[in-house]
Image: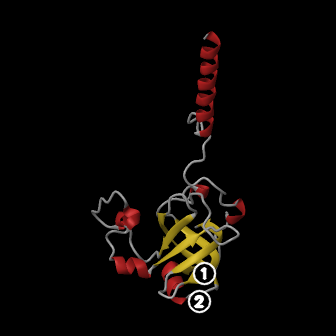
Amino acid sequence: MVRMARELRLALGLLLVGSLVSCGGSDDGTKPKKGAGVAIPETAWSATPLADAKAAGAVRREVKDGESVVARGRVKDFVDGRAVFTLIDMSLKSCEEMEGDNCPTPWDYCCVEPNVIAENTVTVEFQDASGRPLKTDAKGFHGLDHLQVVLVEGKARKSADGNVTIAATLLSRE
């Protein structure tokens, strides 16, 4: 009877240890976090501002699919867990630039008509070798944050409905 009780305790102990290991054990911060993946490579950063940049709105209107481009604008939104953000033309005023506006999220340009925003915005992606956005956050890369003026170099992809995505190879700030 004692032997059977000992074997039962041993079996239950092994079962408990096995379940902790298979579930990842305790949360000690070593589990991958949302968006954890390949970081944006340091070679994608330029401390020197890029030359010959076009305004984000002009890029959207004028660029051809597959064309190399340097775009200039303010960072509007980020995509959580991906190295993706939107770049908006500097001719548009964010809510923080409008007298008397106390908007808590001035980077959303809620004071501007949605169609005007759409006509003056491009998407920026840092991609992996297969052309998919990197699984990491762009926000924070060399201090990248909302409403910063940035310059982005890359290859443009233009959809049939006029949306432009820049596969970024280089980023700098003014």
Left or right, residue 97 beside residue 62: left
Visible residue check, residue 84? yes
Residue 46: tell me if it is visible.
no
The vertical placement of 142 against 65, above or below, is above
**Closest to the observer, 102 or 163:** 163
State which quarter of the image contains the C terminus: bottom right
- The residue pinned by badge 1 equals 156
Q: Which residue is mark 2?
A: 64
Please tell me in which quadrant of the rendered image residue 168 appears. bottom right
Closer to the camera, 105 or 102?
Answer: 105
Q: At 45% across and 79% down in the image, what residue appears? A: 120
Name above or below for residue 73 compared with residue 30: below
> Quick one: label 1, few (<14), some, or many (20+) residues within 10 Å?
many
Image position of 108 (left or right of 155): left
Would you say the residues marked 2 and 1 are in contact, meaning their CB atoms lie under 8 Å apart? yes
Disc ID at residue 136: none
User: What amino acid is found at the position of numbered circle 2 in the picture?
Assistant: Lys
Residue drawn 62% across the image and 63% down it:
134
Q: What kind of element bears circle 2?
A: loop
* Up/down of 3 relative to 94, above or below: above
Q: Amino acid at mark 1?
A: Ala
The residue located at (37%, 62%) in the rendering is: 106
